[in-house]
Image: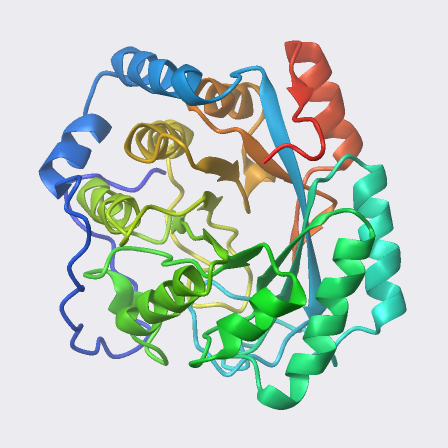
Amino acid sequence: MHATLDKPQPLHFMPRPAQPAAPAGTGRWKVEQIEALLNLPFPELMWQAQQVHRQHFNANEVDFSSLLSVKTGGCPENCGYCSQSAHHDTGLKASKLMEADQVRQAARAAKASGAQRFCMGAAWRGIKERDMPAIAELIHIVKQEGLQACATMGMLEPGQAEQLKAAGLDYYNHNLDCSPGFYGNVVSTRSYEDRLQTLRRVREAGINVCSGGIIGMGETRRQRAELIEQLANLWPQYPDSVPINNLVKVPGTPLENAPDVDPFEFVRMIAVARITMPRARIRLAAGRRQLDDGMQTLCFLAGANSIFLGEKLLTTPNPDADDDHRLLKRLGMRATDAGRP
């Protein structure tokens, strides 16, 4: 059964705190414009997205990234979708920060499979200063292996983004997850402004911004438009990479019984992200195993030009890298040349 588009499907597993007003952005896009795009007949939307995509990218190329959980579980945040939250009984055991040699081996394996970017995730609310030297070492290792270095480790305090930049970090991921108005249905342990503040610190430090959201948490089409509006209007520019996640319903999380989303709605989000953020890498992220080869191909046609390789994304399943290579071969597509931005 698919979620309805005309009214929300709130999952009130926690109190909904009052949301602060979103800070002023660039104002390039209005919610009404984005919603109008989402409401277009599917062929028209795809045609518009393909035109924008071809203006800025080779439509036959896909960028490969790899994502490794270097510190799993025990996160104090209560994000309703997350298997790693200490608030949810998902059976996941918390681990310590991964050893440097393990990360080096994983980076080498990722490069061998075709990845150009290596992202490290840590289930923290934010990086503690005592962990910064170890994180810097892991960044150095990734760079030594000839890969772009990315991290997703929660909120950043003043000065921390500058330390990551000095260590050589290329990208920092911090997803907005959903629209400001829907946010209280998903998490209460941090505010929307906290997320935006971290993205501002990343940008000010000169690190590339990676930020996207999740589809299928009970939101309406209008609320999806509001998420895109936040991303497309980030100051001073939209994210360099925009991961679009298809909710993976993890048993033990408040969203384990969220209503299924029509896969065409997911493709629509890809297309609208491409139109509103034309030079960004639009990445198919979590939940790809819920999309068959045909739907993934539609995502590429809609403007997706990046995927995560590897059998697991942090803790959730992902298609095997060999399957991804086979699909691209069937489509006559290829991986983006390593070393290109």
Could you tell me if residue 125 is visible in this image?
no
In the picture provided, is 30 more to the left or to the right than 76?
A: left
In the picture provided, is 246 more to the left or to the right than 64?
A: left
On screen, 14 above or below 289? below
Q: What residue is shown at x 40% (from left), y 47% (from top)?
A: 239
In the picture provided, is 53 more to the left or to the right than 331?
A: left
On screen, 164 above or below 274? below
Quadrant of the drawing holding the C terminus: top right
On screen, 143 above or below 50? below
Query: Residue 93: x and y, percent?
Result: 70, 77
Name the residue furthest bottom. 130
Q: What residue is shown at x 84% (from left), y 70% (from top)?
A: 100
Foreground residue, 58 or 224?
Answer: 58
Residue 176, quarter of the rendered image: bottom left
- The colour scheme applied to this rendered structure is rainbow
Give the tally of numbered discs. 0
Q: What residue is shown at x 83% (from left), y 55% (from top)?
A: 106
Q: What residue is shown at x 69% (from left), y 64% (from top)?
A: 69
Query: Residue 188: x and y, percent?
Result: 32, 77
Residue 164, quarter of the rendered image: bottom right
In the picture provided, is 177 more to the left or to the right than 235?
A: right
Could you tell me if residue 166 is visible in this image?
yes
Quadrant of the drawing holding the N terminus: top left
Query: Residue 287: x and y, percent?
Result: 54, 44
Residue 183, quarter of the rendered image: bottom left
